[in-house]
Structure formats: structure tokens, C-alpha cells
Image: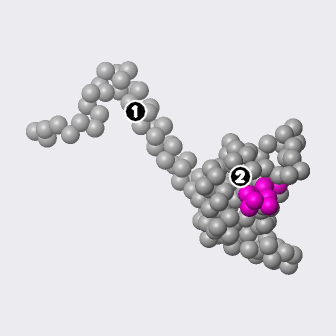
Amino acid sequence: MLEVKQPSDPIPEAGLSIAEAAERTGVSVHTLRYYERAGLVITSVDRTTGGRRRYRELDLRWIGMCTRLRSTGMPIRTIREYADLVLAGAGNEKERLALLESHRAEVLAKLAELQENLELIDHKIDVYRGRMDAGTADTLWFPGPTG
């Protein structure tokens, strides 16, 4: 499960390197860079004087949120829209809520479809087990001669 490590592993004052942030968030370094390029990160990730990224707690929590939204099938453009709304600040809460509610409805529809598919798989497993117990499994889905 994707999860940012909690206070038992505090983030140093100087922040975390991109490799450390990748490890903490469970995403690749490439994904972290992509999220920044795609405009998904709502903070300006700190940089060292040498230009290396330094991630803070807020960065990691936001990246975790984006990753979870993405894993539920939310398109990058919709995550970017949500990020833009958050960055715009107060006053657009209704739009944010509508976006999240719409995505929730899509996730629920996908879950219902997956549940139906799982039920079919369970049925087929029961059929195979029953046929194997009866010794007639060799005729399952066999195209054989039609006679």
C-alpha cells in the first residue's frame, strides 16, 4: 500500500533527496520528475544551491494523494485540474468537490463492474471444481466434433 512514512521517520530539516522521496512515497524518481513537469505538484519543490530537489512533508503528502488518485484511474489532466484548483486557493471548493464526486462515481462504477467480473470468475471456478469432482472436466470448453 502506498503510504508516506509517519513521524517515526521524521523528514530532516533540509528535506529529502529525490531518491529518498521516491522511497518514502513508493513511486519512482522518474514519476516524481514527471509529476513536477506535468504540473501536478502544488508546491515549488525546494532545491539545494547545486539545483538538487529537496522534498518536504507537504510535498510527500501531495505526491501520495496524486498517486492514489492516479491509481484509481483519474486521468493526469484531471489531477492537474484539481491541482490548479488547489493552487488557486479559497473560493473554488465547490469545483473541487464536484471534481472529486464525479471521480468517486466513476470509481464506484468500475468497482461494480469488477464485482460482476469476479462473480463470473467465481462461477467458473465452481463449475470447474464440480466437473473435476464428477470426473467430467475433460469436456469443458472442448470444441470437439459436432457429429
Closest to the observer, 17 or 10: 17
Q: Which quarter of the figure is the N terminus placed in?
A: top right
Q: Quadrant of residue 83?
A: bottom right
Examine the structure image and report whether residue 53 is included in the region drawn in magenta: yes
Residue 139 placed where, x, y %?
A: 26, 31
| Image mark count | 2
Element under label 1?
A: helix
Residue 142 placed where, x, y %?
A: 23, 36
Q: Residue 32: tell me if it is visible.
A: yes
The residue singled out by tag 2 in the image is: 18
Tag 1: residue type?
Val
The residue singled out by tag 1 in the image is: 127
Tag 2: residue type?
Ile
Closest to the observer, 15 or 38: 15
Q: Residue 99: tell me if it is visible.
A: no
The residue located at (20%, 40%) in the rendering is: 143
The residue located at (83%, 52%) in the rendering is: 15
- The span shown in magenta is 48-57
